[in-house]
Image (cartoon, helix red, strand yellow):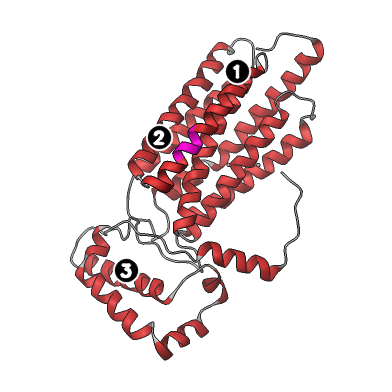
């Protein structure tokens, strides 16, 4: 996703640790896949849990478990599932069969507490790139620029999304999955609002206000349906693709209309084309290279440079708007 500032408040470390543990401890209702349907996997998990996750053995596991594993909610049962997953993968490979998925995901090598280490790292780097460029935007663009506050708000929404993406790929739970999905949708919707403010709202603020209210209602309905009715992955994908296409076409239309008047228009056009084009990497579904890099991780890694180009456009455009406002020139 696929992105930020209010005054920071200090938090005591024990309180922070407790909050993170509570956040990550909730188990994810897993989607069934070929690997976890295998009798050998299920029998392995049952036997492992029966032997290792009760009584003295369980206490021994908990006392030997590294603090970072306990903090991120890894349980004895989770460890059994992890070990039995690799046992099943080994049997598949020895028989010459394609590596299966487990609980809706490819098997990944767990590094420290990170379930999907490459995707977690890529999400973190995207967030850092977004933060770096937000700071550059704030240091370059005066607050008087018409789009200044809207762009700052968009950046905060984006940073929040990359934060939850990092958390989700670190530890997949019921809560972190929902937050990752919902925050990604929020970024797309806010990008539409950003485009609306830039194309219509500067001359007719009431239009952007109405669109903003509509987008909030759409987001609330979307989240409510997925939370209280059915967490339908197909519906969520269709909804995000639909609003993504609105975002793409609206920005491209604005770029086309201003291609002769704004010398930096190509930056915006290239960004939206890159973001939607790179999303096609998700279609390249393959078992993780080195058990770390899958198509999703490659997609997240590929979007890191896009932040620099997008904020370059935002800086150019914000300075242009500020100058035209001072000169009393009609905004394009």
Q: Which residue is mark 2?
A: 239
- Residue under the point 67% across and 71% down: 14
- Residue under the point 30% across and 74% down: 45
Marks 2 & 3, CB-CB < 8 Å contact: no
Q: Residue furthest left?
A: 95
Question: Which circle's residue, 1 or 2, is located before the other in the chain?
Answer: 1
How many numbered marks appear?
3
Q: Residue furthest bottom?
A: 56
**Front residue of 104 and 225:** 225
The overriding secondary structure of the stretch rendered in magenta is helix
**Front residue of 238 and 139:** 238
Residue 58 x %, y %: 43, 85
Classify 40 as above or below 140. Answer: below
Q: CA distance from mark 1 to mark 2?
A: 23 Å
**Front residue of 290 and 211:** 211
Classify 190 as above or below 299. Answer: above
The stretch drawn in magenta includes residue 24? no
Residues in magenta? Answer: 218-222
Q: Could you classify mark 2 by the number of other residues whose Cα lies within 10 Å: few (under 14), some (14-19), or many (20 or more)? A: few
Q: Which residue is mark 3?
A: 85
Q: Which residue is mark 1?
A: 207
Q: CA distance from mark 1 to mark 3?
A: 53 Å
| Residue 157 placement: quadrant | top right
Q: Could you classify mark 3 by the number of other residues whose Cα lies within 10 Å: few (under 14), some (14-19), or many (20 or more)? A: many
Does dot 3 land on a helix, a strand or a loop?
A: helix
The stretch drawn in magenta includes residue 219? yes
Does dot 2 land on a helix, a strand or a loop?
A: helix
**Front residue of 159 and 233:** 233
């Amino acid at each position: 996703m696929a992105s930020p500032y209010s005054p920071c408040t200090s938090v005591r470390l024990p309180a922070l640790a407790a909050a993170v543990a509570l956040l990550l401890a909730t188990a994810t209702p897993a989607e069934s896949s070929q690997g976890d349907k295998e009798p050998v996997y299920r029998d392995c998990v049952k036997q492992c849990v029966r032997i290792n996750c009760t009584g003295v053995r369980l206490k021994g596991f908990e006392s030997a478990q590294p603090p970072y594993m306990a903090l991120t909610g890894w349980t004895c049962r989770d460890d059994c599932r992890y070990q039995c997953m690799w046992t099943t993968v080994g049997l598949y490979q020895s028989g010459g069969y394609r590596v299966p998925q487990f609980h809706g995901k490819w098997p990944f090598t767990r590094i420290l507490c990170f379930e999907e280490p490459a995707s977690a790292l890529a999400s973190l780097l995207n967030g850092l790139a977004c933060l770096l460029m937000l700071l550059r935007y704030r240091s370059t663009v005066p607050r008087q620029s018409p789009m200044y506050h809207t762009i700052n708000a968009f950046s905060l929404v984006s940073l929040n999304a990359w934060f939850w993406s990092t958390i989700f790929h670190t530890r997949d739970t019921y809560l972190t999955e929902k937050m990752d999905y919902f925050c990604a949708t929020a970024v797309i919707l806010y990008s539409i609002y950003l485009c609306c403010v830039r194309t219509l709202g500067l001359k007719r603020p009431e239009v952007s206000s109405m669109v903003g209210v509509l987008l909030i209602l759409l987001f609330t309905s979307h989240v409510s349906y997925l939370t209280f009715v059915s967490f339908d992955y197909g519906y969520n994908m269709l909804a995000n693709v639909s609003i993504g296409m609105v975002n793409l076409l609206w920005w491209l239309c604005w770029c086309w209309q201003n291609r002769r008047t704004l010398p930096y228009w190509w930056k915006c056009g290239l960004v939206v084309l890159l973001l939607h084009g790179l999303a096609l990497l998700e279609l390249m579904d393959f078992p993780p290279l080195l058990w770390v890099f899958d198509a999703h991780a490659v997609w997240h890694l590929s979007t890191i440079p896009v932040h620099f180009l997008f904020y370059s456009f935002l800086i150019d455009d914000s300075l242009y708007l500020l100058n035209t406002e001072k000169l009393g020139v009609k905004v394009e």
